[in-house]
Image: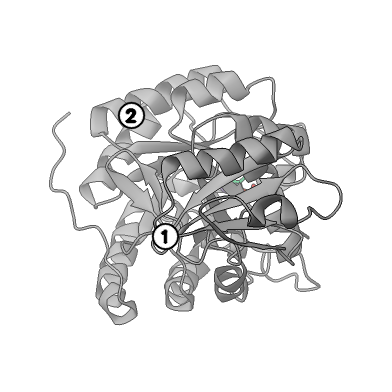
Amino acid sequence: MLVVMRREATPAEIEVVKEKIRSLGFMPHEIPGVQRVAIGITGNRTRVNADHFLSLPGVVDAIPVSRPFKLVSREVKAEDTVVRVGRDSIGGRDLAVIAGPCSVESRSQILEVASMLKEMGVKFLRGGAFKPRSSPYSFQGLKLEGLEYLREAAEKTGLHTVTEVKDTETLPAVAAVSDILQVGARNMYNFSLLEKLGELRKPVLLKRGFSATLEELLMSAEYIASKGNYDIILCERGIRTFETSTRNTLDLNAVPMVKKLSHLPIIVDPSHGTGAWDLVVPMALASVVAGADGLMIEVHPHPDAALSDGFQSLRPEKFRILMDRLRELASYVQRGCPEEAGTVVQ
Ligand code: PEP
Ligand code: MN
């Protein structure tokens, strides 16, 4: 249920509605909008009776939400959500580009790539420290040491960091270091992890599971929002289909469909979505045309020597070309794209 307040409702009237929701044993979620404030209700198992609210001062309407996901749905909030990260944001007019190696492999590797990316106008640095790999024998990441190097690279360049959080045990260590907490495809259904992320006040990048429907993706986002964290960025990263010539099938339908169903920003990861470095640029451009709010791109200074996902990583020279193409494309889709930052002084 969504309780819609009058445009001129006072903070005291809003508080009365929230208190009423709490007294019924449910959780209120204030959803500010341009036109009006609305208050979402979660925690109810059966339909909430609208009569509880309709007579309260400042209330215009109390409407049931038809979707199984509530707080993240467009029905509840018409305006796009913009997730703020320091002075930058994801979901606003500017395309957000998250780039970096699949894994943090050494101090020098992440420092080198961070400085190159900064110079090319990137604002968000990715790099996995805790890597959930399909094989237990594959490189599992540098773990705490990797987090330290990532932090150092961010401090030296002023980039925001994005790194994966693999489980609830390592969440505190990752949350202490990373600006955006990435939930990988393999963890999209890890509801205990999602709930813990909902209790934090840090942006979450939620990747779509290999075989998750969009409704399931949005339900996972709802797990986070239901605990009070609304700073969620969705990521389409390809799904499993019968096609074997690419690592995954990048489902670009997801972008406009998610925009229709939800107010959350959605970015696309064409690196995992294709599994082939030479498909990354065309699919990145296609993602932007489809309406994506940004991209996540794997970039490695020496892909041949990468400890994970080298085959789908762009060399910095190639990534620079992608950034140039994105700048050309941005104005056609009424978006902005960060300019080159100039040489970084270390
Ligand atoms: C990654 O971003 O390196 C990664 C492991 O992605 P995914 O969870 O989408 O496979
Ligand atoms: Mn990877």
Give the residue at x 54% y 51%: 57
Residue drawn 34% across and 78% down? 333
Q: Amino acid at mark 1?
A: Arg
In the depicted structure, whether residue 25 falls above or below residue 223: above
Disc 2 vs disc 1: Cβ atoms closer than 8 Å? no
What is the distance, in whole Å, between disc 2 and disc 1 at their CAs?
46 Å
**Type of amino acid under label 2:** Ala
Q: Quadrant of the N terminus?
A: bottom right
Residue on which disc 1 sits = 7
The residue nearer to you, when weighing 211 against 213, is 213
Residue farthest to the right, as pictured? 46
Corner quadrant of residue 17: top right
Q: Position of residue 296 (x, y in %)?
A: 47, 54
Q: Which residue position is annotated with label 2?
A: 153
Q: Secondary structure at mark 2?
A: helix
Left or right: 46, with 334 as reference point: right
Which residue occupies 45% across, 63% down?
A: 80
Which quadrant of the figure has residue 224? Answer: top right
Residue shown at 16%/38% (left/top)? 344
